[in-house]
Image (spheres, rainbow, N blue to C red):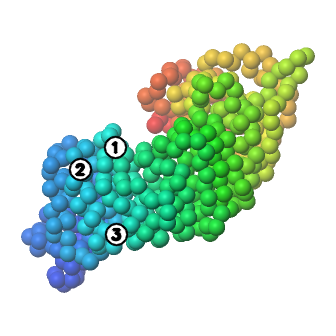
Amino acid sequence: MSESSNKQFKVLQNLPDELMVRSLSFLPIQSLLQTRVVSKLFRHTEIRSLDLDYSGIFSVERSQLEVINIIQNVFNKHEGMEIKRFVLCPNGIDWEESVTSWINTCIGKNIQEIVLDFSKSREVVEIPIDFSAIKTLTVLNLGWCKFDEIPNNSPEGLKLLKKLSLTRTMTTKEMVDAILRNCIHLELLELNECFIYGILTIPALNHKKFKSLVLSTMSNITDIVVHAPTLEYFKYEGYVTNITFSTTDALKEANIHYKRNRHIYDPSDMVISNMKDFTKVYVLATTNIFLEALIKRHVGGGRLERKGTFKFENLTDFKISFNARSICTLFEIAEFLNDCPKVERLVIDIQNFEYADRLEFWEIHLKEEIENNNYLFMFLNEVKIIGYKNHWHELDIIEFFVKNAPALVKVDLEMPKNSKTKVHQPDNARINFITSKFPAIKVTEV
C-alpha cells in the first residue's frame, strides 16, 4: 500500500468490489483522496486511513481555507477506530482552533505519531494541548509551536515515546530532565533553536535504547554534559562550547558543525578539549573551525608547531565543510588524514567558499612542506568536492590524492550552477595531466 496510487489500483482491481472498496479505505490519506476521484464506485469510499499525512497538500492552487475544509471533511467522515500518524506543515498561522480539534480527535483514536511544523508561517503558533498526557505516542515532532508545558515531575503519558523532536519551542532544562526520566524507551532526542540557558545536562545513564542526540543552534547554552552510555550518533550545530561525555564507548558517528562566533577570539583550546571524545568514531563531519584548531603554523626559526594531535583509529568517513573565511588549505586536510589510518571516504564541501585569498602561506611554506612529507592513504577510495569551481588550489587537492591514495577508484566534483562565488576558467593543461594519471574523475553540475 506504500506504492503509487496507480500500482495500488492494479493490485486491487481483481478483487471483489466490496473488498476492494474496504481495502481502499485504509490507504494513506493522500492516496485515498486521489483514488476517490477515479470512479463513482470509489467516490463515497469510507475513510479509515491510519496515516493522515498532509505534508504535501499545500499548493498555490489551493487557498488556506480550502485546505482546512479538505482536512476537516476527512476528520468528519473518518470511521476508523485508530489513527496512527498525523502530519501537518501549515503555511499560515490561523490554524490553532482547527489543529487543536484534529489532535484531540487523534488522541481519541490512539494516535502514535504527531508531526506538527509551523516553520513556514515563520511565527510560533500556540496549540493548547498537553502532549505529555498522551499515553500512546511513540513519535512527537513539534516545530514553531507553543504547547502546554511538560511538567517537571513525571508526566502522565509519553511512556512509549521513542522519538522526540522540538524546534523553536519554549523548552526548559527541567522539562528535558522530566522527559528523560519518564521516557525509558526514548531512542532519539532532537532540540533545535530551543531557548535553554546555561548548562544543559542529558541524564540518560539508565537508558538502554537511547541512540541519537541532536542539538542545533542553542546559542544560550554554555556547557553540554551528556550521560548516555548507549549513544551512537551525536550532532551539534552552533558556536563552540564545552561538551563533556561521561562515556563514548558506543559512539559511532559525530557531526560537529561549529559556527564562527565573533565574540570568541580563538576557540581552538575548547575545540581540542572537546575532540578527545570523538577519536573512536567511524564517521565524522565537521567544519574548518575544527581544522584550524589543530593547525600547524611556523613559529620562531621556521619551526612548525601543532596545537593538538589525536589518532582517529576507527575513522572511515570524513567530511569537512568550509563555512567561513579560513586559513585552512590542503596541508591541514592532509595532516589530519595522516592521523586517520583507515579513512576510506573524504568529502570536502566548499559551497559558497573561495580559496582565492590567504594562500600566500601555502605558496611560501606549506606547499614545500607537503611535498617533503611522505603521505600514503592506503584505504582511501573515494574523494568528493562539493562546490568545485576550477580554482587552482582545488586542482592541488585533486592531484595530491590521485598521487597518494593507491586504492582510489572515484573522484566526484560537484560544480554549482548558481554560486555566490565565481567559477574560474578551467586550466585544461593541468586537468589533462591529472586525468592522464587518474581518468575516473567525474564533474557534474548540481
- Element on which disc 2 rests: loop
Q: Residues within 10 Å of mark 1 (few under 14, many from 20)?
A: some
**Mark 3 or 2, nearer chain start:** 2
Q: CA distance from mark 1 to mark 3?
A: 24 Å
Q: Residue 215: where, in percent of width, then height? A: 55, 47
The answer to whether residue 72 shows anywhere in this view is yes
- Element on which disc 3 rests: loop
16 w.r.t. 235: above or below:
below
Residue at the image position 24 percent from the left and 71 percent from the top: 9
Q: CA distance from mark 3 to mark 2?
A: 20 Å
Quadrant in which the N terminus appears: bottom left
Q: Residue 296: where, in percent of width, then height? A: 79, 28
Which amino acid type is shown beneath numbered disc 3? Ile
Q: Which quadrant would residue 3 be assigned to in this image?
A: bottom left
Work out which residue is located at the far front of the displayed protein and give it.
Answer: 153
Q: Which mark is residue 124?
A: 1
Of 431 and 129, which appears nearest the observer? 129
Q: Which quadrant would residue 83 be assigned to in this image?
A: bottom left
302 w.r.t. 308: above or below:
above
Residue at the image position 31 percent from the left and 46 percent from the top: 125
Which amino acid type is shown beneath numbered disc 1? Val
Q: Residue 399: where, in percent of width, then height? A: 70, 32
**Mark 1 or 3, nearer chain start:** 3
Q: Please state if 189 lies on the left or on the right of 342 as rendered.
A: left
Of 117 and 298, which appears nearest the observer? 117
Q: Which mark is residue 111?
A: 3
Which residue carries the number 2 mark?
A: 95
- Element on which disc 1 rests: loop
Q: Which quadrant would residue 302 be assigned to in this image?
A: top right
